[in-house]
Amino acid sequence: MDVNQYLEIFLDETKEHLQNLNTQILELESDPEGEDTVNEIFRAAHSLKGMAGTMGYKRMQNLTHDMENVFSEVRNGNIKVQPKLIDVLFQCLDALEEYTDNIQNNADEGTNDNEALIRQLNDILNDNGGSAPAEAAAPEADAASSEPAGGEKWKDIVLDDSQISVIKEAQNQGKKVYGLNVVVQENCILKAARAFLVFKAVEEMAEIIISMPSAQDVEDEKFDRDFTLILLSDVEIEKIIQAAESVSEIEKAIGAPVMLEENQSYKKAEEDAKAEAAEAEKAAPAETAMGPAEVHEETAPAPAQAAPAKQEVKKNNAKPVVNRTVRVDIEKLDSLMNLVSELIIAKNSLVSVSSQEQTNTNTAFNEQIEYLEQVTTNLHESVMKVRMVPIESVVNKFPRMIRDLSKKLDKKLELYMSGEETELDRTVVDEIGDPLMHLLRNSADHGIESAEIRAQRGKPSVGSIFLDAYQDGNNVVIEVRDDGNGIDTEAVKEKAIERGSITPEQAANMTDKEIVNLLFLPSFSTAKKVTDVSGRGVGLDVVRSKIESLSGEVEVKTKLGEGSTWTIRLPLTLAIIQALMVVVGDEKYAISLGSIQTLEDIVPGDVKLVQNKEVIHLRGQVIPLIRLNEVLDIESKKTADENLIVVIVKKGDKMAGLVIDELIGQQEIVIKSLGKYIKQCKFISGATILGDGEIALILDANALI
């Protein structure tokens, strides 16, 4: 069986289970008696074991099997949750993540057997009087599992009226009715998988009428060692038994013909069903038109518990809840997004043509363009919603990270998170994990003080780190804050002078905010010694460069002795934006509306010089001017005495005025990446295709500021 086709699904689901295990084991650490948590961990380990076994990853299967054994004993109350157990479980998760990474990179789990970990798990089992692994592995045994495995159990199955009629009809057509009981080996790890293969082998030569336990329970491994089938077939029972026993890890299969008239329970069921049908017909003739034969269950209830036919029909009318989500490859979404982008470009072309040809007289044409605009906007929003994912997938791994840091740094730390459901474009979510990790590590190591210092300052012994996310207009804001020491600007200043980043004269004139921004310089670190947590100076410069590559911004507010707040602001999407189209010289440019505050008409006489730089005084603020024709090296069409058209843009609390020649207006544009062609030109973030086929470059206001 070629399992490579299932590799992506396996990896996706494994990562989900591992994240779930991380979260649940953290919960178990804080509440060792939590029964629901223990059950959830058991189920996740059990699912991982089954998936790994099906894919042929034996090492992963063995490790999860031993984890499952331990949790079986925890569920039974034989093992108490101790700190040592939690530590071993987290080591198991790290080992499973290593297997998963190997599988993702090489489609092979590697050669690490993790014998030491398996030994530790078995020691925990043995030290706490746990039963043998084979016994511990039996999950959620069915009510019938207390009976000995094997035997003619099909005689105990009670059929409903419709099943009896199906069997009789088959007998009339010359088909034989058999009962089959299949027993799996005692040490079988993947009972459900073996049962599935038996079902498959049997179905090639027979029709399965009933399974006990039900097929769903067998699939969920809710049976002990055997399951029973009633079959219809033209083939001899010996061949069916042979097919069932040919499946590996099947101990035995027994079968024999079923004689309905010899079985009292069948007779009883038939009589009860007839009596109920007659009763229901008297009570409500109209409703019995559906007939009891339409009531079909895999395993019928015992006659004594049977409900009236009227109620049965009503109950079966309820639609089952099905999974309403679909896994879609991100490349397919990218392709769909590109098609939407082309549609928007086509719409812009029509708008451009209509304005050139002055078709205002043609009302129908304009109505069609408006309709097209409405459709493309709705389609764009729909595709964007599909691409949006909660940042939960990224932030879920941080509580475990803070727990590990707490032990490593010997500090009491607590992480509080809010807004995990906030959604961002998938491409952005995939990239923000690293920056957030660096900020959290920074808070844990540099921010939160030692227990002694916190006690001196009258702070709680446990340091608090907060991770909050929320939507703000067309942006998502993520804040990382702590109640720690804050940033010592004097220490930063001294370190910067020592490194030669600034001169003592420059340092004397710098504001606290400018000094704090020095932390974002490459290889800058204030740590006294290098550890595996910090001190290498690869943290905050990675944060800034990564966030700015996503067209976002990061800023920090800090108060010495009280703590710091790092604020990341990201655009909701990186694909299609609303932009202001402007002209500089003979060229058209786009500026994202998200960064624009106002448009101003400025008289040349209002432009002043401060430290030899042009500024304007606007509503109580001094705003520096950036003449785009000089930055872009284009000759302006405007003369010196003409009023200036200034686009006021904002980045954090900084503002600037971009001087342009002409305004075109607002337009929805598709961002096309320029790739590696002009990496050095920081203030151009991409390009777009206009309605007339022209290319317009997109200016990055953040970089210009």
Image: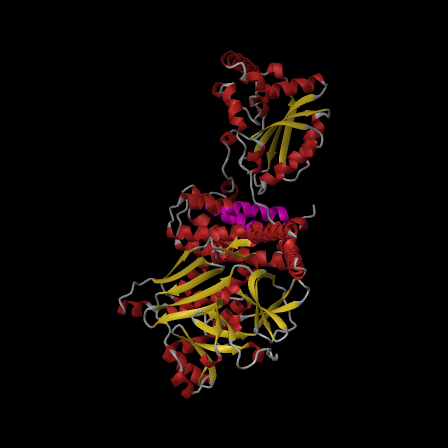
Which one is nearer the viewer's eye here, 186 or 193?
193
Question: Can the viewer see residue 258 in this picture?
Answer: no
Measuring 67% from the left and 67% from the top, which residue is drawn there? 694
Measuring 61% from the left and 14% from the top, which residue is drawn there? 261
* Residue 67 lies in the magenta stretch: yes
Q: Which residues are magenta?
A: 44-71
Question: Can the viewer see residue 170 in this picture?
Answer: yes
Q: Is residue 253 above or below residue 640?
A: above
Q: Is residue 308 above or below residue 34?
A: above
Left or right of 198 on screen, residue 30? left
* Residue 259 lies in the magenta stretch: no
Measuring 54% from the left and 82% from the top, which residue is drawn there? 640
Which one is nearer the viewer's eye here, 337 or 493?
337
Q: Answer with the quarter of the image where residue 75 lies.
A: top left
Left or right of 556 on screen, residue 133? right
Which one is nearer the viewer's eye here, 556 or 450?
556
Where's residue 78, x and y in %? Answer: 41, 43
Measuring 49% from the left and 77% from the top, which residue is drawn there? 625
Colouring rule applied to residues: secondary structure
Q: Main secondary structure of the magenta part?
A: helix
Count the marks: how many? Answer: 0
Where's residue 254, x and y in %? Answer: 64, 28
Where's residue 652, x and y in %? Answer: 44, 69
Q: Is residue 329 above or below residue 273?
A: below
Q: Quadrant of the N terminus?
A: top right
Which one is nearer the viewer's eye here, 164 or 337?
337
Where's residue 107, x and y in %? Answer: 65, 56
